[in-house]
Amino acid sequence: MSDEDDLEDFDADQDDLEKEEDERETEEWEDYRKEGEDLSEEWLPTPLTEDMMKEGLSLLCKTGNGLAHAYVKLEVKERDLTDIYLLSSYIHLRYVDVSENHLTDLSPLNFLTHLLWLKADGNHLRSARLNELPYLQVASFAYNQITDTEGISHPRLGSLDLKGNRIRMVTGLDPQKLISLHTLELRGNQIETTLGINLPKLKNLFLAQNMLKKVEGLENLSNLTTLHLRDNQIETLSGFSKEMTSLQYLNLRGNMVTRLGELAKLRDLPKLRALVLLDNPCTDESDYRQEALVQIAHLERLDKDFYEEEERAEADEIRQRMKETQEQEAEPEHSFELEQSSM
């Protein structure tokens, strides 16, 4: 799934494509989990060897003062590896892919202080903890057995992928250390609360397919533009703050929002332009689409469809009538106050 930064990037079919991708990735996650259960007792020790290194190395680059050269890219996917200790001596590596092996320990990567890009998906890791790597920008630990988010403190890390793990709560993500993190992928975990995601630089947050019942603790995410909360158990839309001044795209598909009145809690999001609420009970209401626009006047797209000018004009009329009704209801009370003051 691509990360949408601007409303112009939203495609009418995007949600269907994202739904298909989520389902596919969930199937992959189940495959990884079953494979781990079936084969965990059958693994033979398979360390990374020099021959594997020779096959997997590529991208010759200058190193140090520019007088020497070394291969800086390594791909050793699907080799049944259980040990990558050999990597500790290849200190010039910048791009490493050790996905789809049987690894439980990534500590040899601590020696790779020039590492820019790491992919360790589909292993049997229980932690993403590494020493601080000063140049690491992209790290993916998808479909492992990781239970927490501790020990991740790379100052240039921009994108972190932890989908398909066993995380219940986000802890240890220090905004003073993760000063460059703009995209956090946490789909398909067991997360029960959004507390702990206090990362003001974050732009894209993916929390679909978790166990969330509400949104809380996201008030400081003033740069967040994209928030995916699809397929959770959210019933209330409390927790969205006017301090979330950059949020443009909110996906709440497949949750448990019942009352259309909950939409009023989103009107203080000043840049919200696209909202997805498909597969929530409130979408069964006959005036669902109109009510969403009445509550959120600046909304441009609901689910797959952009609002037409006629719909916008009708919503304006309804808001005007509501305003007039409220003023009329307030007039008798105001008159009564004047009479009391004159007595």
Image (spheres, rainbow, N blue to C red):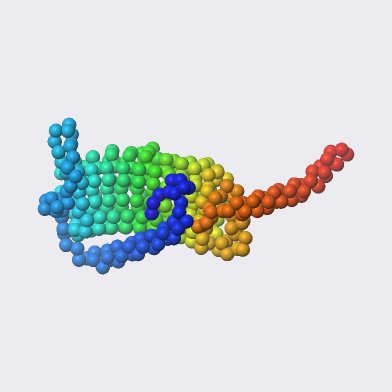
Extreme left residue here? 51
Farthest residue, direction bottom: 38
Most extreme residue toward the top is: 65
Residue that appears at 13% across and 36% down: 68
Which of 155/78 is in front?
78
The image quadrant where one finds the N terminus is bottom left
> Residue 53, how many percent across, how many down?
14, 50
Image coords of residue 124 (percent x, y): 27, 58
| Whether residue 220 can be seen here | no
Q: What residue is at 20 percent from the left and 49 percent from the top? A: 74
Residue 9 or residue 186, whichever sits in front: 9
In the picture, measured across the screen, residue 327 lies left or right of residue 160, that is right
Residue 30 is situated, as x and y percent measured from the top left of the image, at: 33, 64
Q: Is residue 317 left or right of residue 117?
A: right
Relative to 264, is 191 on the left or the right?
Answer: left
Residue 14 lies, in percent from the top left, at 44, 56
Q: Residue at x 40, y 62 (%)?
A: 20
Q: Is residue 250 left or right of residue 139?
A: right
Q: Quadrant of residue 132?
A: top left
